Image (cartoon, rainbow, N blue to C red):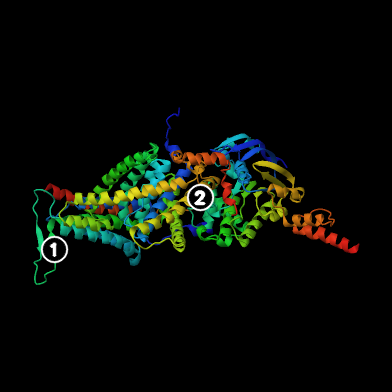
Amino acid sequence: MGTVIEFANVTYNYPLTKRPAIKNLSLKIEEGKFYGVIGANGSGKTTLCALIRGFAPSFYQGKLEGKVLIDGKPTTEYGPGELALRIGYAFQNPFNQISGVKDTVFEEIAFGLENFGVPFEEIEDRVVDVMRLTKIEQLAMKNPFEMSGGQQQRLALASVLALNPGIFVIDEPTSQLDPEGTESVFEIIEMLKAQKRTVVLVEHKVDLLAEFADEMIVLKGGELIRFGDKQEILSDISLEEKGVQLPQYAVLGNKLINKGIALDYIPITEKQAVEVIGKAVRQGGAS
Amino acid sequence: MYIEQIQIRKTNPIASLYPITKLWIVLIYSVMSGIIATIRFNGYAYLLFVWFLAVPGLSFASGIPFKKFWKAFSKVLIVALMIIGIQMFLVQTAGEGHSIVELVRWHITDWPFVIAPTIYEYGLQNGLELSMNILNVAGIFVWLFQTTENKELSRALEKSGLHYKSTYVFMSSLQMIEVLGKNSKTIMNAQRARGVETEGNVFVRMKAFFPSIVPLVLSAVTNTEERVLTLESKGFDTPCKKTRIFEVNKNGHEGLALGITIALSLVFVVWKVLQWVR
Amino acid sequence: METKKKYTLKNDFSMVALLLIPIAVAINFVGGQLASLLKLPFYLDTIGTILAGMLAGPWVGAVAGALTNVVTGIANPVNFYFIPVNVIVGLVTGFLSRGNMFSKWWKWIISMVIMALASIISAAPIVVLVFGGVTGSGTSLLTATLMASGKSIWSSVISVELVFTVLDRIISYVICWLIIKVIPARTLVKYSCGEFYISKKARAAAESAGEDAPEDESEDE
């Protein structure tokens, strides 16, 4: 497993701003792992995504110090559209992720393939595969503008997936969706993990991150305050003062420990909670 | 399977002519209309009516249902009728030195309050020319757009060399009109619910315009930023040969169609030349 | 000492400007629709063109204007004839914008006069020569009345245009300017003429806030 994304002491300012959105950030992202990005609003999570994808500074302009390296090469040295094939990017507003010129889901997904000059014979199969993986094949002939938010978001992810990038950067994909839409989007994210793609996911729903992530990236005020193993980070109650919301099971676990109940470890998922609290209850009952 | 489903297949041989050929027909027809307008018989350009017959002729031969044709055409017809009306009742002469010829002058009879309109010959002739010209040109465009989907026109233009970013802007405009149109109704209803008055005098109604349009424009402009990122991610900026899954093809009758158009046009060109020479 | 800004077609037609064009077309359409829904005596169908011209210069404005009439012409071909009018609105607005002619009130007056002249010069000939004075819109009745009272076609059309088109443009410009005032500075910066409209106050606010990132949209209020 090699390093695919590297931040080398990166500081970035949006245009016309004095205070940097990201300050002195260094980290390495390894291939095939799933990273969850958390932090208070305004802590630089979206900026982090934009930096990885190269939109900062190329689209947002502004000032970049330090280097953001993808596969060892700075993002600024990639040509237009090159990074799109390596890094897939999805964000909050499903409506803005539709090209706006195609009137069927099929053509919308094929749009990216058309633009990259993928040979005609390959297109149909690739689109059908992706529609099956994201479970939207039944919507193939539907007009993207007549779909629900959740469906549109699945379409956005499908369109990105069709280009087969090894890295996925996803910025709060479920914030504007209802619970049903959220669930369907997370099914797709689960699939990305199963395919062993490198995923960087910004999410407020920490409980879901606890299920999928391998490692966590915690930001505050544009700086990296924690980076590493998810179990350790997501159970650390001191992070709540830094604006981070812990999974409910971790909160529960911490509270129980404060009340004097001994737990082997602090759980962060439902499964862990059942296991570790159940054990404590049995032991408590036995004594 | 899906690629086949998104193609447009038409059975009517005229409707399925290649879009660029249709554009040529429209162009030749419009130019000829201007020329035919100058062939006068006692000052009247009767031949314009004959030329106009091509519009309903082509439309019905292409299989356009009457209702659909009428919906677009009636708008133009109203304008044409207004033009004739205004011209024939109000426009007396071509200017200084030209005589005023009255065609009809009704006398005020026992109906004391009936206004007696006079119909002026110059106005009638001028009005007929102007309105027939407009009917011809507008009519042939109605035929074009009712037998050609925007998608087809777009693809054909791209094949002829129009840059793909231009076709994108064109198609996106059509889509945006629909989206913003829907949003504006929503916003206006929301404003009404908040108590913004939409009835009343001009100033009240003006005040209702502003809060209806501003949020629309604002959200549209800021959403544009993210859409730029989306397009970049879909290879829009990448300079390479693009594949296209939607295709438009010639149906084989293009030569015949253009031939007939040119032949008919030549008839009138010759007529004009003869009239001019005499 | 600032060097004179150099405008290139490439900069004018950046991706954001290119994507602004469909929006401008749609705004023109919706503006016209709203105006007739509210039964206002103005067209208000050039707000989009003006916005495009102000933000991205004359050529983008011209394309937005032309495309509007091409697209609306599909439903009603009469609109094709007025392509030049909309194009001129875009061109004039764009050139005025490049010259920063909207920054002070006296500059506004000059701009409005130029715009009024340009509008009349472009619209009147079309109305007279192609339509004989009557376009089927509400103002046609007024034109007809003037003609009936003995005035020539040209003076009737120009009188009516003078009042209604000029008023229409002035109102549209004001609406546009007010809209631009609420567009955030970080968006304005991306358009070739956008900087002129970033007020000192907005600039100061952006600098001190520091956090100008797009992620602010995600706040749960």
Classify 10 Å Cα crowding around label 1: few (below 14), some (14-19), many (20 and above).
some
Residue located beneath label 2 in the image: B223
Q: Quadrant of the N terminus of chain A?
A: top right
Residue C124 location (% of width, % of height) = 25, 48
Label 2 with label 1: CB-CB less than 8 Å? no
Specify the farthest residue to the right. A287
Q: Quadrant of the C terminus of chain A?
A: bottom right
Q: Foreground: C202 or C58?
A: C202
Q: Are marks 2 and 1 on the same chain?
A: yes
Residue A253 location (% of width, % of height) = 78, 56
Which chain letter goes with mark 2? Answer: B
Specify the farthest residue to the bottom. B110
Which chain letter goes with mark 1? Answer: B
Residue B103 location (% of width, % of height) = 10, 61
Residue A101 location (% of width, % of height) = 47, 53
- Residue B165 is at least partly visible in this image: yes
CA–CA distance in space, label 2 to label 1: 57 Å
| Side of A210 relative to C58 (left or right) | right
Q: Amino acid at mark 2?
A: Asn
| Side of B125 relative to A111 (left or right) | left
- Residue A33 is at least partly visible in this image: no
Q: Amino acid at mark 1?
A: Pro
Residue at point 82%, 53% (across, down)? A265
Q: Earlier in the sequence, mark 2 or mark 1?
A: 1
Specify the farthest residue to the top. C1
Residue located beneath label 1 in the image: B117
Q: Secondary structure at mark 1?
A: loop
Residue at point 49%, 40% (across, down)? C201
